[in-house]
Amino acid sequence: MRSKEQLSDAIRGERRAALVVNAHSRRGGRLYQDARARLLAAGFTLLADHPVHRPGELERSLTSALEQSPDLLVAGGGDGTISTAARMLAHRDIALGLLPLGTTNNFARTVGVPLELGEAVTTLADGTVIDVDLGVAGDMAFTNHVGVGLSADVMINAPRRLKRVTGRLAYPITALALLTRHRAVRARLRAGGRQHEFLTHQLYVANGGFHAGRPITGDADADDRLLVAYPVGDGSRRALLRETARNAATGHRRTLREEPFLAVGELWLETDRPARIEVDGEPCGQTPIRIRVDPNALRIMAPAGTVDR
């Protein structure tokens, strides 16, 4: 496998890329042609070029693109699309290029990739390859988070049309509709020889530094060899709403040393009854589950000057 410096030089010099855009994402269908034109104008040769119009076609399109052995796989779409591409690129000698075209774009925010299309393409052309951690829930790798409780129900029930019209507001709107009949779960986390217990409607285990487009804390990121587990409120619905609002407003001022955050490299999660799990917005079975960090598992194209730890 080439060093990161060698891969950076190959991408900037030879510009051999493959493009896969989720045209079903919020902005993907509208911006696919623009993204393609900008990449060609930046001097990239597109060894593969796939607009994906049906969810079931995404993995097949990514597989087809990877068969062309590009130096850079450019994935356009939301966090689900990016997470799928990241799983397929883990521990490979190919960098992931991000075109953030989704609703919240949490991973792009975490690694500092600009959300504006032109600036994102500039990052692909002139940036640098770094490696970042992935989380692994069971045997499923993820870039951003695992959600247990209400968020899993929201991801299953949020109407696609509402997401297209309202963007990231679709999730709290759906959550409010479901909350009146949602039951809290008692979650037990075992990590580092200790057990932690929470009664809550919502528990997250995050790898990245953002959730719902907002910072989790001021010092959480995807390159620190840590997962961040935290409940949102206690067993009352009012506490869930209060803590959700607090997290959105003050996340950038909080640190991993504060309650209720638990920063660990690996944990075992179980609940008093089987609870649904979502991984980066996709349904992924039920508890119990083991969740761990896979350090430096993914190479990405980041803005020039990004610190790589």
Image (cartoon, rainbow, N blue to C red):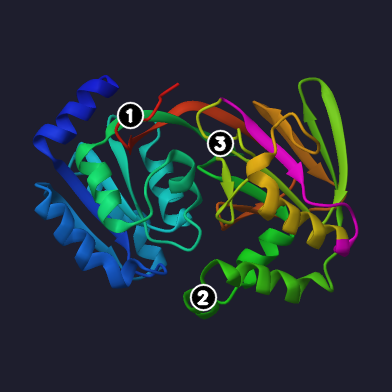
Q: Which residues are magenta?
A: 225-238
Label for residue 160?
2
Among the two numbered marks 3 and 1 on one chain, the one whose residue lies closer to the N terminus = 3
Contact (Cβ within 8 Å) of mark 3 with mark 1: no
Q: Amino acid at mark 2?
A: Arg
Residue 275 seen anywhere in this rendered image of the structure: no
Q: Secondary structure at mark 1?
A: loop
Q: Amino acid at mark 1?
A: Gly
- In the picture, measured across the screen, residue 206 lies left or right of residue 268, that is left
Which residue is at 69% across, 65% downward? 153
Horizontal and vertical percent position of residue 52 = 31, 65
Tell me the CA gap for discs 3 and 2: 26 Å
- Could you say which is closer to the camera, residue 275 or residue 223? 223
Residue at mark 1: 305
Residue at mark 3: 135
Question: Is residue 180 rendered magenta in the image?
Answer: no
Q: Secondary structure at mark 2?
A: helix
